[in-house]
Image (cartoon, rainbow, N blue to C red):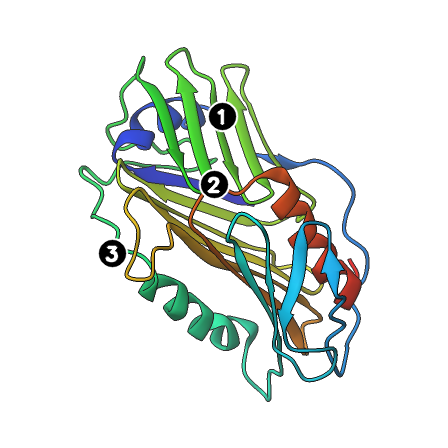
Amino acid sequence: MKLQVTGAVAAGAVLACLAGCSPPHPHGHEGGALKSVSGLDCPAEQGDLKLASGASGAGPCVYGDDAGDKITLTLVALNGQTPKLALAPFQVAAQAELPAMAPSAGGATASSTGANDGAGDGEKVDLDLPGIHIHANGSGKAQVNAMGVHVNADDKDHATVTGGFGGDHVQVNANEGGARIDVQESGSGVRSIFLLASDKPGPNGWRSAGYQARGPESGPLVVASILSKQDHDEDLRHDVKRLLERNVGG
C-alpha cells in the first residue's frame, strides 16, 4: 500500500507528519462484490438529487440538486480496454472544466516508507477547496478529506486510510490555488475516485470536477461524473455513493 501527498502549501505540514509514519492501514469493512449490469438504474430521486434528464437503461442520466451540483451517471463498456484507459476521457473532461493547476513549488514528496524531500516541521495548513480539505496543526497531526476518502496521520507513528474503498494507492497534490486527489484500488473490482478542485471557477463556473466509478474488472463500469460550484457536503457524497451502490452494489 502506498500513500503519497505532494504540493506546495500542504506539503510542508502534511509531509512533516506523514514522513515518519509507518505504512497506512485500511479501516472499515471490505466492500461487497460488484455486479455486472447491462443498463443503468436511474431513480427519479436519490436523496437531494433529482433526475433532470435520461432514464433507466442506456443512459446517461443527469441529476441536479438545489445547490446547483450536477451528477451524470454513465454506463461504460470496456470493450477490451483497461479500466484506466476507459476512464481517461472522464479525467480529460474534468480537467477541461477547471483552470490548470499551478505547478507545486519545491515538489516535496512523502510516502509511507518515510521519504521526505524538504518538508519543514511546525507548519500550519488550512487548505479548503470545493470537495477537498487539508488541515495540519503544526504539531505533527494532519488530515485530508476528499469526497468520501479520509486520510489521517498523527505523531504516534501511524496513518489511516478510510472511506470504504480499501484502496492501495491514494495520491493527493495540492497548493494554494488547487488540489487533485486520485484513488485507485487494485483488488477485486474497480473503485475509483478522481477529483479536482480550484479556488477560481472554470469556464463554466465549476470549482470542483471529477468522478467516482465502480464496476467489475471486466466491466461495464458505472461512472458518476461530478460538477460543483461549491463545497461537497456529506449529503452529496452519500447520494452519489448510493446511486453507484444501487447500480453495481459494493
Label 2 sits on residue = 231
Residue farthest toward the front in the current orientation of the protein: 66
Q: Amino acid at mark 2?
A: Asp
Mark 3 or mark 2: name the one nearer the start of the chain.
3
Q: Position of residue 90 (x, y in %)?
A: 46, 70
Label 3 sits on residue = 100
Give the Cα distance between marks 1 and 2. Answer: 30 Å
Q: Quadrant location of residue 99?
A: bottom left
Q: Position of residue 4 (x, y in %)?
A: 43, 41
What element does badge 3 sit on? loop
Q: Amino acid at mark 1?
A: Cys
Report the residue at 78% width, 42% height from top.
29
Label 1 sits on residue = 21
**Mark 2 packing: few (<14 Cα in 10 Å), some, or many (20+)?**
some
Above or below, comparing residue 59 to residue 160 in the picture: below
Relative placement, left or right, of 236 versus 44 is left
Report the residue at 81% width, 62% height from top.
33
Report the residue at 74% width, 59% height from top.
45
Nearer the camera: disc 3 or disc 2: 2
Q: Quadrant of the C terminus?
A: bottom right
Give the Cα distance between marks 3 and 2. Answer: 19 Å
Nearer the camera: disc 1 or disc 2: 2
The front one of 144 and 240 is 240
**Mark 3 packing: few (<14 Cα in 10 Å), some, or many (20+)?**
few
What element does badge 1 sit on? loop
The answer to whether one can see residue 23 in this image is no
Q: Position of residue 100 (x, y in %)?
A: 24, 56
Mark 3 or mark 1: name the one nearer the start of the chain.
1
Relative placement, left or right, of 183 versus 36 is left
